[in-house]
Image (spheres, coloured by chain):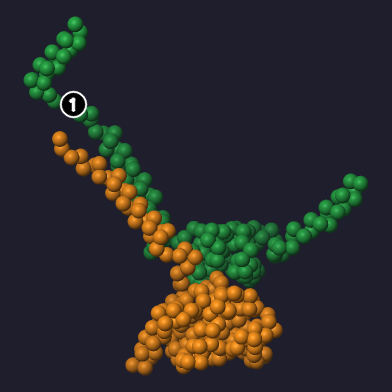
Chain colours: A green, B orange
Amino acid sequence: MVRVLMAIMLVTSVNCFAAIDAYPFPDEQLQQRYNGLIDELRCPQCLNTNLAGSDAMIAQDLRREVHRMLLDGDTDDEILSFMYERYGDFILYRPRLGGGTLVLWLGPLLLLMLAAIAWFRLARAKPKVLEISSDEQARLDKLFVEGDS
Amino acid sequence: MTFNKSLLIPLGVFALMVVFLALGFGLKDPRLLPSVLIDKPFPKFELEDLRQPGRLRTIADISGEVSLVNVWATWCFNCLIEHPELLRISRETDVPLYGVNYNDENAKALNWLARHENPYEFSIVDDKGTLAIDLGVYGAPETFVLDANGVIRFRHVGPVTPEVWRQTLLPVVEHLQGMSDG
């Protein structure tokens, strides 16, 4: 009985592989670079999915292109540049430095510096001593005396 | 009592956030990618003509005058929506319209053109999507306006409706035609 069940499960589970386009690579290192690249490249049609996680037609085409370029001996940098020249900043999850992305890269640093300055000034500021006139002091003394009695 | 100016800082930060959020969420469609190919030459290609198998088309076939290049496919629903307008443009204007049949099957594409009429001077077979990738295409339909030198001057993502043609594409085309005449 168990064997029959296992056989059935084995046969039906094959379907799971159908939708994934697994590309063959001659060695493990290329495969790892491929995985890294499709992880880092964003699918241009989807709002927030990388190439590895998308089933969109353009994602399939771009995965095929990454595979082809890797087999052609292109470096990771060349492949990322190829994509960047066609799809712009959007396709890179780690955008390049320059132009509009400057705010992205330097913004957090700037905010951190502002926070540090604010914190420094707050920490250095002496607590203010309130000054009161002699009239007020007299009233205060009177209040204390009345409160005691 | 004197007014403490530092009380204004949170208000300023809030105003800044409002501006950034409005820019990020409100004013533009996040699905529209800015094209990096504007003012760059149309990518080189050597692909078969859809209706004349064996005949290779190159960039030389589409440059020479201001033209439109439309990326289409039979699986693309919006292509059907823009089709009447493309037919009208090809009939009523003298702007040449070229098709890039993207990730499609030739038999289906020919069938589609026969059924819905052919607005294109010719269509290029891009069944592997390589030209589309060089164009930075991420869906269909997309329409490019090329100047007489074959340089990409404008890109429209989505269907070419009569409004899009009148308000967006036609002014670009006329401007470019004026430039190449003068």
Q: Position of residue A110 (x, y in %)?
A: 35, 50
| Badge count | 1
Q: Quadrant of the C terminus of chain A?
A: top left
On screen, residue A74 versus residue B30, left or right, reads right
Q: Quadrant of residue A51?
A: bottom right
* Image vertical order of residue A136 relative to residue B80, above or below: above
Residue drawn 39% across the image and 50% down it: A108
- Residue placed furthest toward the right: A1
Residue beneath disc 1: A129
Picture residue at 30% right of the left edge, 42% below the top: A117
Location of residue A31 with respect to B178 vertically, above or below: above
Residue A81 x, y percent position in the rendering: 51, 68
| Residue nearest the observer in this picture, B180 or A138 | A138
Left or right: A29 in relation to B13: right
Nearest to the observer: residue B171 or residue A51: B171
Residue A30 in the image: state x and y as whole percent. Answer: 65, 62
* Chain assignment, label 1: A
Where residue B143 appears, as percent x and y from the top left, is: 50, 79
B39, B5: nearer the viewer: B5
The reply to whether residue A139 is in sight is yes
Q: Secondary structure at mark 1?
A: loop
In the image, residue A133 sits, relative to residue B11, either above or below, namely above
Q: Give the residue displayed 63% in from the left and 78% down from the top.
A: B74
Q: Amino acid at mark 1?
A: Val
Can residue B134 be spotted in the picture? no
Q: Is residue A131 above or below residue B5?
A: above
Q: Give me the residue at 63% from left, 75% from top.
A: B75
Dot 1 surroundings within 10 Å: few (below 14), some, or many (20 or more)? few
